[in-house]
Image: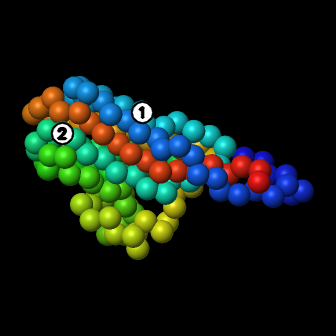
Amino acid sequence: MPIDGTVKYTWQHQPDAELTQANPVQNTWYPVINATGGVRIIYLEVDIAAAVEDLECRVTIDGNVLTAIQPAAIIATPYYFLLWANTPNGVIFNVTDNLVYRTYLLEGDSVTVEVRKTTALGAGALHCLMKWARLLPA
C-alpha cells in the first residue's frame, strides 16, 4: 500500500472476521477474510463442533502461504494459530494461547485466511475467529 509521507497512518481495529460453517464439506476451503491495503492479524483461532476431525488453517500473506494442521481436534476446543520456529512451515495450532508467540502480528498488503476439515467424521460446524486491524490514515 503506498504511504503518503504527509499523512499520519495508524493501525485501526476492524470488526472481527468470523466464519461459522454448518455441515462443512471435507477438503473444502472456507474463506474467513480476503483483504488488501495494510492488514494485520492480531489473533486467530479455529474450532469444530465434531469430534476428532482434522483441521487446517491456511494464511496467505502477500503470496506467502502458512498452513497450520491439527489432527484429531478435540470437539469445541479452540486451536490458536501461532508462529513456531521448530516446525517445517513455521506455524502450529496450539490449545494454549501463548501470548509470547502472538506478538508477531502477521502483516501484509494482501491477506487471505481460509479453513477446512480434511476428514469426514461428523457434521459439526467449523468456526474461525480473527481479530485484525487495517493501516489507515489517522
Task: Say which quarter of the image contains residue 120.
Answer: top left
Question: Mark number for residue 49?
Answer: 2
First of labels 1, 2 by sequence position: 1
Residue 4, numbered label: none
In the picture as drawn, the residue positioned furthest to the bottom comes out as: 100
Q: Quadrant of residue 52?
A: top left
Mark 2 residue element: loop
The secondary element bearing badge 1 is classed as strand
- How far separated are the C-alphas under marks 1 and 2? 18 Å
Q: Residue at x 35, y 42 (%)?
A: 128
Q: Amino acid at mark 2?
A: Ala
Residue drawn at (37%, 35%) of the image = 19
Q: Label 1: few (<14), some or many (≥20) within 10 Å?
A: some
Where is 50 relative to 81, above or below? above
Whether residue 54 sits left or right of residue 60 in the image: it is left
Q: In the picture provided, is 93 more to the left or to the right than 121?
A: right
Query: What's the residue at 24%, 60% (across, down)?
Result: 95
Say few, some or many: other residues with alpha carbon within 10 Å of mark 2 (under 14 / 14 to 19 / 20 or more): some
